[in-house]
Amino acid sequence: MTSVPADYATAKSGWWHRNQQSMTPLLLLLPGVLFFLFYVIFPIFQSFNLSFYEWDGLGERTFVGFYNYEELYWDDAFYVSLRNNLIWLLLYLLAIPAGLFIALFLNQTVVGIRLYKSLFFFPFVISQVVVGLVFSWFYDPTFGLLNEMLGFFGFDPINVLGDERYVTYGIIAAGLWPQTAYCMILYLTGLNAVDPEQIEAGRLDGAKGGKMLWYIILPQLRPATFIAFVVTIIGALRSFDLISVMTNGGPFGESRVLAFYMFEVALSEYGFRMGYGAAIAVVLFLIMLVYISFFLWKMARDERGA
């Protein structure tokens, strides 16, 4: 019989050998946690701190307390941006039912379904800049397809991106195109995990059509719906690129949202007011926090009730 080497016995009884099974997941998570702390949590606290200063980004900071928030209270451009953000929030949620119904259609076995899927996937893989350019041409008052169609039906042409009444809705319609495709992909993934035995049991109980969708399929799509809600809300609140490409905030600042207004006052030729921009970022973060907290609370409550 061979004896165990003394070094091996010492290593086996060491702290790492006894705890490596519990420590390995923590070590694997550590790089991701450090990146999250450095690139997400730290900037959030830094924005809160910066919002109490007047700073141009280069010179010395001046502590001004809550002055930036007081200025926000009297700033008309801030309220226009906030109003537009709320419109974005309400209308952008239309992407969720639209994505669901397209996913239900694409989940069928019909002739040419691969071609249909490719067409509906297309807006998801192109950049927001391209989407903005395509819709800018579509809305163009001189050669755009929209006014060609309106003229065909006898309506007067409209300048969607040049009219303060329509501009925000026109940009949201452009944003809904790729966002609907994203929600559709989430629901297609969820439909692949729907339990066929529950569907069969529902059919035996006489459920079909709307009842089958509401009572059998939608409850099983709850995780996909939650992710679609969260991603859509975040997308609506941080909308920036479409506005920058299609109108650059115009006409007369009527298409601004909070993210774009923050960029204008902090980093564009209009400002370099880092503290004021940070105060807008804090307001935007708090709005987002309220929405996300509500949906997390609702999901936890539903899970406990399930």
Image (cartoon, rainbow, N blue to C red):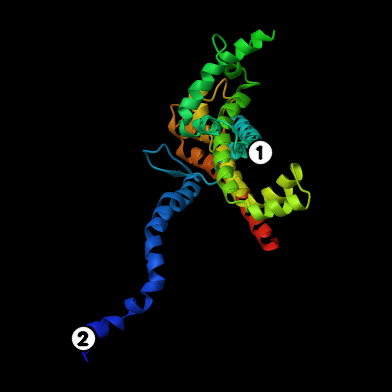
| Residue depicted at 60% across the width and 18% down the height | 160
In this rendered view, identify the residue nearer to me: 100 or 270.
100
Instruction: Give coordinates of residue 162: x percent, y percent.
Output: 58, 16
> Residue 202 shows which numbered tag?
none
- Residue 83, compared with residue 278, is above or below; it is above
Q: Which residue is mark 1?
A: 97
Element under label 2?
A: loop
Q: Quadrant of residue 169?
A: top right
Quadrant placement of the N terminus = bottom left
Quadrant placement of the C terminus = bottom right
Is residue 283 visible to us here? no
Kindly give the residue lying farthest to the right in the view shown: 206
Of the numbered discs 1 and 2, the one sitting upstream in the chain is 2
Lateral position of residue 228 relative to residue 40, left or right: right
| Residue depicted at 60% across the width and 51% down the height | 223
- Residue 192, compared with residue 153, is above or below; it is below
Task: Specify few, some or many for label 2: CA neighbours under 10 Å numbering under 14, 14-19, or 20 or more.
Answer: few
- Residue 162, compared with residue 200, is above or below; it is above
Lateral position of residue 89 relative to residue 68, left or right: right
Is residue 84 visible to us here? yes
Instruction: Give coordinates of residue 99: x percent, y percent.
Output: 61, 37
Task: Specify few, some or many for label 1: CA neighbours under 10 Å numbering under 14, 14-19, or 20 or more.
Answer: some
Q: Which residue is mark 2?
A: 5
Element under label 1?
A: helix
In this rendered view, identify the residue nearer to me: 256 or 22.
22
- How many marks can you see? 2
Lateral position of residue 94 relative to residue 26, left or right: right
